[in-house]
Every structure is written in structure tokens, then in C-alpha cells.
Image (cartoon, rainbow, N blue to C red):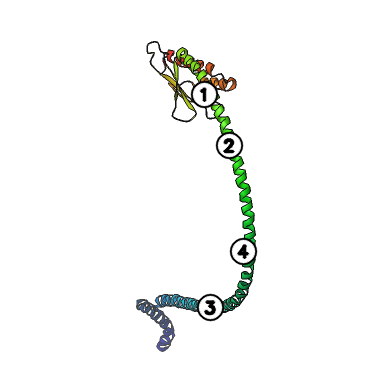
Amino acid sequence: MPSDLSSSSAPPSSQPQASSSSQANNSMAATLPQINFGFEELKDRMARFTVRFDDFIEKGRRRILEERNEFAKTVIEEKDTQRMLKKEIEHYKQKEKDVAENATKEQQEATEAERAIAEMDRKKQSKEEHKSHLLAQIEATQEAIRKKREIRAEERKALSFQSSRNAPELAFWEDHLGMRIEGAGVTDHLKIVYTHIVDSAWSKEFSFILNMVTRDYEVIQCRPKLDPATVGKWVDRLNETRDLTCFLKEMRQLFKEHSSAGRE
């Protein structure tokens, strides 16, 4: 009986012992150190190697391409050189041919030169005849000019006579309008100067410059300055009527009105 009890109780006691052994092994495994085999570093080094290898391959391809292009360029240059040499050979051949042709042409030109000399002699004779004709025309023209000068002299004499008649009229204008006519320093420009406009200062001068270059008169300067619109109106009337006496009176009146208004 005792032996039976011991044998029957053995199996239950062996199961707790196995469970405790497994727990002991797990706890020992947890306390073991972690070993780093360097897989991440290896992957990084392999990636860098791949980049360097790709760069090496790319540089090699570019170098081969550049060498191939350089070779192709050299071949093209050699062909261009051959082409240029061929052209130079053809040029000198053509030049040799031209020299031979020029010798023939010079002979022909010598013959043509003789004919040209004969033609020039003929033209010279024709020009001599033309010259004689021109001299006759010049003589006739000079005679016509002489006659025109005589006519102009008569006209100047008539103008001088008219000027002598105009002098009293001009003196009349100067006396009655208190004005004088001067040169403006420019051809066909007259300076008209008025005095006796201001009662308190009879010697004070008022003037304007009359441009007579073209058919239409033009007042280009007034001292003191007058209203341009009013002056323009009287200038337009002068160009229509050609009545200079009336215009001079009106300009004097404009200066007098300007002075009476107290404007400078």
C-alpha cells in the first residue's frame, strides 16, 4: 500500500517541476545581451556604393560619348580640310585657264583699243564742233544779259525816282505819327518805333518788328508786348488791303491804349 501511494503520486509532482523549468529558461533568455549584426549600416553602405557605382557608370558613358563626339568632329574637320584642298586645286586650275584666256583677251583688247582711239578722235572732232556751238550760245546769252542789265538799270532809276517821291511821304508819317523806321538787323525786316505816346514821357519808345520776307506781312516782336489776338487781327487786315498807312495808325493806337491801361 505505501508503494502504491508513492507511485500514484509521482506523476502529479513532475508537472509542476516542468513548468518551473520553462519559466526559468524564459527569464534567462530575457537577460541575454542583444547582439547588433549591423544590417542597417550594411544597407547604408550598399546604398552609397550603388550611388558611387551609378555615378562612375554615368561618367564613363559621358566620357565615351565625348570621345566619340570628338572623334566625329575630327573626322568632319579632316573631310573639310580635304574639301578645301580640293577646292584650292580646282581654283589654281581655273586660274591657269584664266591666264591663258586673258592672254587671248589682251590681244583682242589691243585691237579694240585701236578702234576706240579712232572713235575718240571722231568724238573729239564732234566735241570741238559742239564747243563752237556753245561759245556762240554763250555770246548770245551774254548779249541777252547785257540787255537785261540795261533794263534793270532803267528800273533802278525809276525806283530811285519813286523813292525820292516816297521820302516826303515817309517824313509826313514820321512827323504826324511820331514814328521812325529803322533796320531790324535782318534782311527784309523793319523796326517801327513810336514816340509821343505817353504825355508825361514823350521820348519813351514803343516799337514792333515787321517781317516782309514773304508776301504776307508778319509782326514778330512788340515792345511792350501787345495782345497777340488784336495784333493778329490788324496784320490780317493789312495783308488783305495792303494799306500800310492805316496799319501804322492802328498799331500806334494799340500802344496808346496799352499805355493808358497802365500795363508795361
Q: Which mark is residue 117?
A: 4
206 or 63, which is in the foreground? 206
User: What's the residue type where badge 4 is placed?
Assistant: Ile
User: What's the residue type where badge 3 is placed?
Assistant: Thr
Q: Quadrant of the N terminus?
A: bottom left
- Residue depicted at x 60% and y 37%: 144
Q: Earlier in the sequence, mark 1 or mark 4?
A: 4
242 or 92, which is in the foreground? 242
Instruction: Calculate the distance from the C-alpha at mark 4 to the C-alpha at mark 2.
Output: 40 Å
Label 2 neighbour load within 10 Å: few <14, some 14-19, many 20+: few
The kind of secondary structure element at disc 3 is helix
Residue behind mark 3: 81
**Residue 232 percent location from the top left of the image:** 53, 22
User: What's the residue type where badge 1 is placed?
Assistant: Ser
Residue behind mark 1: 160
For discs 2 and 3, the disc positioned in front in the rendered view = 2
Residue behind mark 2: 145
The kind of secondary structure element at disc 2 is helix
Residue furthest out toward the bottom: 3
**Residue 81 percent location from the top left of the image:** 53, 78
Above or below 158: residue 36: below
Q: Is residue 17 left or right of residue 78?
A: left
Above or below 149: residue 191: above
Q: Earlier in the sequence, mark 3 or mark 1?
A: 3
For discs 3 and 1, the disc positioned in front in the rendered view = 1
Verify CB contact (< 8 Å) between mark 3 and mark 1: no
Instruction: Calculate the distance from the C-alpha at mark 1 to the C-alpha at mark 4.
Output: 61 Å
The kind of secondary structure element at disc 1 is helix
- Residue depicted at x 62% and y 73%: 107
Q: Quadrant of residue 48?
A: bottom left
3 or 168, which is in the foreground? 168
The kind of secondary structure element at disc 4 is helix
